Amino acid sequence: MRIVVDLNRCQGYAQCVFLAHEVFRLSGQEALTYEPNPDDERRLQVQRAAAACPVQAIVIDRLDGAERSVTS
């Protein structure tokens, strides 16, 4: 799984951090950092985090390209 966050769109609401804190983190008050290739076992958490993003800044993609799940 690959994650891409549009950091220009991200407003630092941190909903993703609350739902998948192993993958998404806030540095300082508004700077989001994230693991771009988390384990597939975290897929459900990441999907929920992407769905909860108020500005829909998170895109999820499988690395093999067989399936694409875009949440934006």
Image: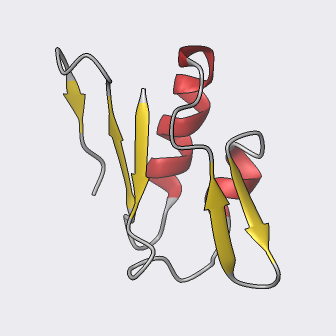
Residue 58 image offset from top left, x and y in percent: 41, 56
Compared to 45, does 66 lie above or below? above
Q: Which residue is pictured at 43% across the width and 43% down the height? A: 3
Q: Which residue is pictured at 37% across the width and 64% down the height? A: 56
The quarter of the rendered structure image containing the C terminus is bottom left
Number of numbered markers: 0
Compared to 22, does 42 lie above or below? above
Compared to 30, does 67 lie above or below? above
Residue 51 image offset from top left, x and y in percent: 44, 50
Residue 25 as seen in the image, left or right of residue 6: right
Residue 60 as seen in the image, left or right of residue 44: left
Residue 25 image offset from top left, x and y in percent: 74, 59
Q: Nearer the viewer, residue 34 or 15?
A: 34
Indicate the quadrant where residue 33 lies. Answer: bottom right
Residue 70 image offset from top left, x and y in percent: 24, 43
Q: Which residue is pictured at 53% across the width and 83% down the height? A: 11
Compared to 10, does 20 lie above or below? above
